[in-house]
């Protein structure tokens, strides 16, 4: 008797299928990016993963974790690499800087800029640069310049005369010290964090500032070195639940821990969302409206899901004070519609700690305001100024002050 085993897919088959999916899903929109993805053998840049995992359109391959188990380096998911490469608009002969290395994305850039182009790829971690340089040489992209160092400091020394036509930042950053390295008409693609929210922006030079052409929801490993985030964090219940807020008074982790296991206030809003429907603009609304806004995370493996009912598994909105918090939750409100196969959910707020009831009420009011005025609005505009620029305060929005820049978020 012979077992019915499907024949193993070759990396070439997997690559062809991946490219088809990226085209179907609209992540690849140009012929140049399609050709680049069809050429780069991505499994050679992630030997720790199976070829199937290396070609999974929505999955990253983590290549390094820190002592706490957090991912510090990875090969980014194909959909995100494709989206960022499309936005970088790389042409043959272009000069490109990649911040955060690994090899795979640098090889894709090298395909796009061709033999006349320049690719500089910087990483802070010698484990990453050693591998990246080796994999690039083995796959025929040995001309990519792999540089070891903190991009905050070393990128300037490698800038060509006239600047880079594209800078692709492939690590989550809180600030942008590289705007002056852009050539006229150049593009900066960057996952930038503000108020604990991250969006991947495509910035173009626009007079004395940069203007974002788009802002996509994304997740990246955090930047290390001089530009590392300074967010406040509190780990509750031995790390089962984590709270993060960008600024404000210090978080009292012991008091917040007690708050978690104490009484819970539950408020409901009557505001509905379809099952699987995104509500990303709520994060932007809260980040630009309430200084207590932050994120709450639950670690399922450590029992976090038994302690909190988060509206989102990660990046769930929360209002935090030093000893209390209130987070966004959801409950099923399908009622009769469920029999027709429709599911809808109702937003609510769960409050913990002495100020829990007041915070839950504030969060409830924010959800109502977002639903009434912001939910269907166009995304806000994002402009990035040098730190010393005089930026007029937006009528509706917020200016996020950073070390090298100011990010202005303005609702139309
Ligand atoms: C998501 S990985 C890069 C992915 C890669 N570009 C690819 O081919 O898919 C992010 C990288 O950023 C690096 N990194 C973090 N902080 C950095 C810094 N300050 N300067 C340069 N690299 C940094 C990390 O070591 C990590 O390897």
Image (spheres, rainbow, N blue to C red):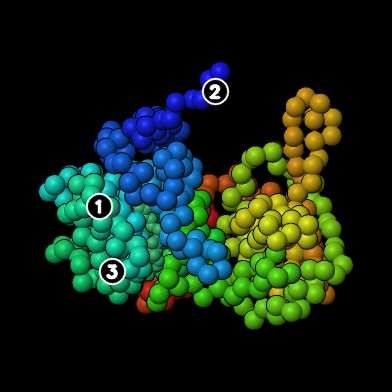
Task: Bin the neighbour count of mark 2 within 10 Å (Cα to Cα): few under 14, some 14-19, many 20 and up.
Answer: few
Disc nearer the start of the sequence (2/1): 2
The outermost residue toward the front is 1
Q: Earlier in the sequence, mark 3 or mark 2?
A: 2
| Residue 271 in the image: above or below residue 184 | above
Quarter that holds the N terminus: top right
Toward which corner of the image does residue 131 lie, by quadrant?
bottom left
Residue at coordinates 26% horizontally, 56% vertically from top-left? 134
The earlier-in-sequence mark between 1 and 3 is 1
Residue 339 is marked as none
Secondary structure beneath label 2: loop
Q: Position of residue 254 (x, y in %)?
A: 74, 79
- In the displayed structure, 305 sits above or below 388; it is above
Work out whether residue 185 or residue 56 is closer to the camera in this orientation and state it. Answer: 56
Residue 3 numbered mark, or none: 2
Q: Pick the residue in front: 109 or 44.
A: 44
Mark 1 to mark 3 CA distance (whole Å): 15 Å
């Amino acid at each position: 008797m012979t077992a019915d085993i499907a024949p193993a897919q070759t990396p070439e088959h997997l690559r062809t299928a991946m490219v088809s999916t990226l085209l179907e899903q609209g992540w690849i929109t140009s012929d140049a990016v399609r050709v680049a993805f069809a050429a780069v053998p991505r499994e050679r840049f992630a030997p720790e993963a199976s070829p199937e995992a290396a070609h999974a359109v929505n999955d990253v391959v983590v290549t390094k974790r820190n002592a706490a188990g957090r991912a510090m380096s990875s090969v980014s998911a194909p959909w995100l690499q494709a989206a960022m490469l499309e936005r970088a608009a790389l042409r043959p002969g272009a000069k490109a800087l990649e911040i955060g290395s690994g090899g795979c994305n640098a090889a894709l850039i090298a395909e796009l800029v061709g033999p006349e182009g320049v690719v500089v790829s910087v990483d802070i971690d010698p484990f990453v640069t050693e591998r990246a340089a080796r994999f690039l040489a083995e796959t025929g992209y040995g001309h990519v310049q792999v540089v070891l160092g903190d991009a905050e400091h070393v990128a300037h020394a490698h800038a060509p005369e006239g600047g880079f036509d594209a800078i692709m930042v492939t690590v989550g950053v809180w600030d942008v010290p590289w705007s002056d390295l852009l050539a006229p008409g150049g593009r900066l693609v960057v996952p930038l964090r503000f108020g604990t929210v991250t969006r991947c922006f495509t910035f173009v030079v626009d007079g004395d500032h940069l203007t974002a052409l788009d802002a996509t929801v994304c997740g990246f490993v955090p930047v290390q070195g001089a530009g590392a985030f300074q967010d406040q964090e509190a780990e509750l219940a031995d790390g089962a639940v984590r709270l993060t807020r960008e600024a404000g008074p210090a978080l009292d982790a012991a008091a917040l821990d007690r708050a978690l296991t104490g009484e819970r206030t539950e408020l409901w809003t009557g505001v509905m969302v379809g099952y699987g429907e995104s509500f990303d603009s709520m994060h932007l609304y809260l980040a630009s409206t309430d200084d207590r806004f932050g994120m709450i995370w639950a670690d399922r493996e450590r029992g976090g899901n038994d302690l909190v009912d988060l509206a989102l598994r990660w990046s769930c909105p929360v209002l935090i004070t030093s000893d209390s918090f209130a987070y966004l939750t959801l409950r099923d409100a399908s009622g009769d519609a469920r029999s027709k196969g429709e599911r809808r959910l109702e937003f609510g707020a769960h409050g913990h700690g002495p100020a829990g009831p007041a915070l839950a009420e504030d969060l409830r009011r924010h959800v109502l305001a977002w639903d009434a005025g912001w939910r269907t609005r166009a995304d806000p505009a994002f402009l990035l100024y040098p730190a010393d620029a005089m930026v007029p305060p937006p009528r509706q929005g917020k200016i996020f002050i950073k070390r090298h820049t100011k990010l202005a978020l303005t609702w139309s």
